[in-house]
Amino acid sequence: MKVRSFLCLLLFASALLSGAAQAQAQRRGPLVLAAASLQEAMNDAARAWAARRHAAPVLSFAASPALARQIEAGAPADLFVSADEAWMDHVAGKGLLRPGSRADFLTNRLVLIAPARSAVTLRIARGFPLARALGKGRLAMADPDAVPAGKYGKAALAALGVWGSVEARVARAENVRAALALVERGAAPLGVVYETDARASSGVRIVGVFPSGTHPPIVYPLAILRDARHPEVEDFRRFLLSREGKAIFARRGFPVR
């Protein structure tokens, strides 16, 4: 009888803890894993959602591959917003998305930046003298082998015939915001980032915009994760995709789809 009573107490305690965890989850909003370039705009969207008397979403920003690996490892998240289709495809291929929840969300532009006080001028065109403009410095980019902004940048520079001249001089950053920071600090004389990143910083200026035809289309898809548990995740997803939601991102410079 004592053993049975002890087991009953354990089950009761477990139920209490489970109920407390669910209550805690409902006091916060959905947990959103979002590409680093979305920081300001996604924070704006979260505040707008909270202003509607919803629990504020919990936002976690990183490079898309890092987020995808967190999801694979079982991160208890609700919504994933990637900076490219490839990493969303990767997560989908693992069976980790809720069927029917994926949608293309935003787009962006790719730009070449310099520190705000830099006097460098360049016209982005085939064969433009990027290596010469770097002097003895390095070109700041998100990792061109994995991170979307870096992959887009590598594709653009290759299409323009200058990748070979700068490949060995790339300062590979863990995400696009880390690449931006290198240029802000003057640790790199030039960098390749999204236009929205450059607009979010007073420490850099845009030297030029890469023609859209030099790289794959920049697409930000979003999707609910298979194991999402928050009761408002679908409502928040619909809010982001709504006219009001997209207008928030448009104000931060994101062309909406």
Image: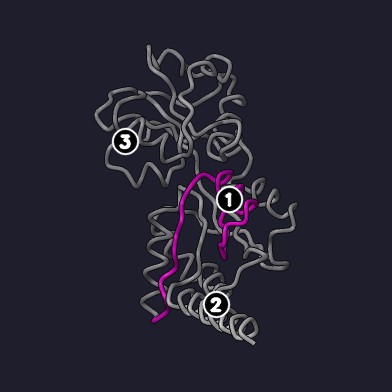
Q: Earlier in the sequence, mark 3 or mark 1?
A: 1
Q: Quadrant of the N terminus?
A: bottom right
Q: On the picture, is 37 further left or further right than 225?
A: left
Q: Is residue 179 magenta?
A: no
Q: Would you name the residue on which mark 2 appears?
A: 18
Percent x, y of residue 24:
45, 75
Q: Residue at x 64, y 40 (%)?
A: 216
Q: Residue at x 39, y 55 (%)?
A: 252
Range of residues picked out in magenta: 53-81
Percent x, y of residue 46:
41, 67
Name the element at disc 3.
strand
Q: Would you name the residue on which mark 1 appears?
A: 70
Q: Would you name the residue on which mark 3 appears?
A: 204
At label 3, counting other C-alpha atoms closer than 10 Å, the crowd grade (few under 14, some 14-19, many 20 or more) is many
Q: Residue at x 28, y 23 (%)?
A: 119
**Gap between marks 3 and 1, in whole Å?**
31 Å
Percent x, y of residue 127:
54, 18
Q: Quadrant of the C terminus?
A: bottom right
Name the element at disc 2.
helix
